[in-house]
Image (cartoon, rainbow, N blue to C red):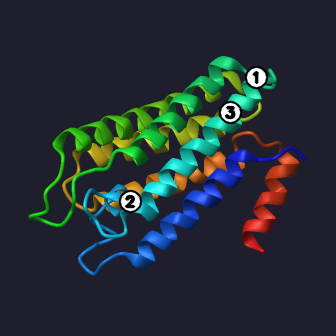
Amino acid sequence: MDFKYNVFAVFVFVSFIIVAHILAIDSYDWCEHTISELAAQNYKDRLVMKSGFILFGGILFLGVLRKLLNKQSDFIAELSIVFYALAVFVSGLYSTKPFIRGLHYSESEALVHSIAATVAGTSFCMALLIFSIKDNKRRFVHALFFVFATICSALFMISEQNLGLIQKIMYLGSFIWLVLFYNTNSKQRVLIFILLCG
């Protein structure tokens, strides 16, 4: 079986998210605060989550690049995943503003992070849309995840409460798609599902 860079990238990212939440200070509210805020400027354990973003984006990018160079996939379909991976990588390099009031931070760095996060979300939705058009076998599944991601993104932009919860639900959906429906066939999906449940 080929190396499943998408599964490995998600496994690494989820591991860092779990560790970052374990190390989170008491004032971090997982319903209100985002995962990005665990990598916020001047946050004491920010390197944990920054590393998670950088490794996830880097692994995913290199995996897609290898696949494209070997001409193993449709260029247009994979291009949005390339942009998604690079945007997540950049969002790890540049941090959001602190969720703790009174801490000094760079507004320009926070702006770059915000732009990168927006590009990541948009690119991921575009990937789902393109896959729903190009993949005849799983068109309905890709379309379903596209609707899910679009609704979650809209809620995240208009909501004033529970932003952390909305983002984590959105991340969960993206991880499920990346692991089970991107770069896998039906036999591999069954094997991955058994491993996750077992």
Tag 1 near tag 3, CB within 8 Å: no
The answer to whether residue 16 is above or below residue 185 is below
In the image, 3 versus 126, the foreground residue is 3
State the residue in front, 123 or 48. 48
- Secondary structure beneath dot 3 equals helix
Number of marks drawn: 3
Q: Secondary structure at mark 2?
A: loop
Q: Is residue 86 left or right of residue 93?
A: right
Residue 56's x, y, as percent? 57, 49
| Res 35 label | 2
Q: Are marks 1 and 2 in contact (CB under 8 Å)?
A: no
Task: Kindly report which numbered mark, 1 or 2, lies closer to the viewer in this rendering.
Answer: 1
Left or right position of 22 against 194: left
Q: Which residue is mark 1?
A: 69
Q: Earlier in the sequence, mark 2 or mark 3?
A: 2
Residue 18 in the image: above or below residue 178: below
Using the image as rendered, state which of residue 109 and residue 196 is in the foreground.
109
Q: Where's residue 141, x and y in %?
A: 65, 40
The quadrant the C terminus occupies is bottom right
Residue 96 coordinates in the image, percent (x, y): 27, 50
Label number found at residue 178: none
Question: Which residue is farthest right?
Answer: 1
Type of residue at label 3? Answer: Val
Q: Is residue 131 above or below residue 62?
A: above
Q: Residue at x 17, y 67 (%)?
A: 100
Q: In the orientation shown, which residue stands out farthest toward the left?
A: 102
Please report the residue visible at 57 percent of the width from the left and 66 percent of the height from the top: 15
Question: Most extreme residue toward the bottom, as rendered?
Answer: 26
Query: Marks 1 and 3, how far apart in space?
Result: 9 Å
Query: In which quarter of the view is residue 162 placed?
Result: bottom left
Q: Residue at x 76, y 25 (%)?
A: 73
